[in-house]
Image (spheres, grey):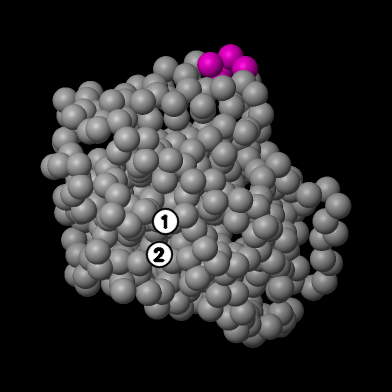
Amino acid sequence: MKTHQIIIPFLRILRKFSVALVFALYGLFLNSCKVNESDVAPAPDNVAPANKFSAEVATKWADLQLLLTKTTAGYTPPVASRAYGLAGLTMYESVVGGLPSNQSLAGQLSALTTLPKSESGKDYNWALSANAAEATLFRSLYAEASRPQAVVNKRAIDSLELVLKNAYKTSVPQDIVDRSEKLGQDIANAIFDWSKTDGGHEGYKRNFPATYVVSVFDGAWQTTENGQKIPMQPTWGTNRTFVPANQNMAMPTPIPFSSSLASPYYSAYLEVYTKSKSLTDEEKAIAVWWADNPVETFTPPGHSYNIANIVVKQTKAGLGKAAEAFARTGISVNDAFIFCWKIKFEFNNERPYTMLRRTVDPKWAPFWSAPPFPGFPSGHATQSSAASAVLTDFFGDNFAFMDDSHLQRGNDAITGVAFKARFFKSFSQFATESANSRFYGGIHTRQDNETGLLEGEKVGKNVIALKFKK
């Protein structure tokens, strides 16, 4: 296969939609968020705890966020990870007042000292609170994009909110409806205001800052394959993490650069080249399944968030448990991306395409096009491992599930590889496969993946250490 047949120019992937295409997608948005009110489980009663409600409110908002992330310009993986973190936290906080054994994360997360609370002795409908909270947050995250895209996003958000509200307000006194919705709105607004100071606010506007000066040294990242001269989100690693313990974790160090053909450095990259010459059909399928390019998909952190979505649906979790699952997963992928990006831009390690063309084969092309930022460590491995850790802690080890995230895509347009569902016996197995996919794709060395898995697990354990329970 020739180089031009497998390289996907990253700028083309990230370009903004044309006006015609955005409005063509309007029907897709509405179909995706269309819910028959008769399909929504009714509230058990007006004062039921959150887990007496089904998880439908949580999963339907997760479904819409995955779509909005895919179709909103500028939602690169780091930017997307932050959005999932904010959505999961907002969902949890909007229902925590209806979870007798749980408590708010206010006072535990970085710089988040307080949040609005439910009034003691007052009744709330927790599905309505969660519905209003997610809709309010999504308008701030996705309906402030460039027009006409913002118009499309807002219509999709408004549509889903209205359908779910109509389904859940039936037979609920108006004062409870109003009180529940106001609580959700207040929580969402407070969390969004808090997010404005984390360093990632409106990050979709500055994915490739022109003022950034690219480092130049032996073994440094270079633009070779995709033509993007400024790396993606070079300062993302300075953002504030949700969990304080994830802010100042010790950074691992990569194998030191060497020009010697007998060095560990050379061997690490040569292994990528050797594997690229002997890929099996299964390894190609794995590389394509986990690619998760922006605009084409909901991004790598979205894949982890969707796995949480799959598991919530599979277990028929109540609303409270679903909200906690999304919070844990969203927080973990957010913090994993920040820490991973901190390491990436501390060392600025070159990608295999640079090193191998320089030392082995000037015409070599990887199976999958590499994204425009340094290699060490793997973002896929780091965020997948963090999500795996929190999901294992929450749903148990050896939890079997089917990942059907890309079944609707048919065959990959570049490689021709078919998208087929993946089956896993545990969450750690999915994280390992996600990491391996980048080695098979020729994008990362084995060291990048192994380090990412180790560091991501540490990030996830710090999320697990939060006191969700009283």
Residue in view at x 63 percent, y 33 percent: 145
Picture quarter with the C terminus: bottom left
Give the residue displayed 63% in from the left and 66% down from the top. 240
x and y percentages locating residue 398 in the rendered image: 19, 69
Residue at left offset 63%, top offset 40%? 74
Q: Which mark is residue 104?
A: 2
In the rendered structure, the answer to whether residue 131 lies left or right of residue 248 reads: left
Under tag 2, what secondary structure?
loop
Amino acid type, label 1? Lys
Compared with 388, 295 (above or below) is above
Answer whether residue 110 is magenta in the image: no
Residue receiving disc 1 = 117
Front-lying residue, 377 or 303: 303
Q: Is 20 colored magenta in this rendering?
A: yes
Count of numbered tags: 2
Above or below — where is 28 with respect to 283?
Answer: above
Report the residue at 59% width, 25% height from top.
Answer: 149
User: Which residue is at the front of the view, 250 or 280?
Assistant: 250
Q: Are marks 2 and 1 in contact (CB under 8 Å)?
A: yes
* Snapshot quadrant of residue 121: bottom left
Q: Main secondary structure of the magenta part?
A: helix
Label 1 CA crowd tier, 10 Å (few <14, some 14–19, many 20+): some
Mark 2 or mark 1: which comes first in sequence? 2
Residues drawn in magenta = 19-23
Q: CA distance from mark 2 to mark 1?
A: 9 Å
| Disc 1, SS | loop
Q: Is residue 404 above or below residue 20?
A: below
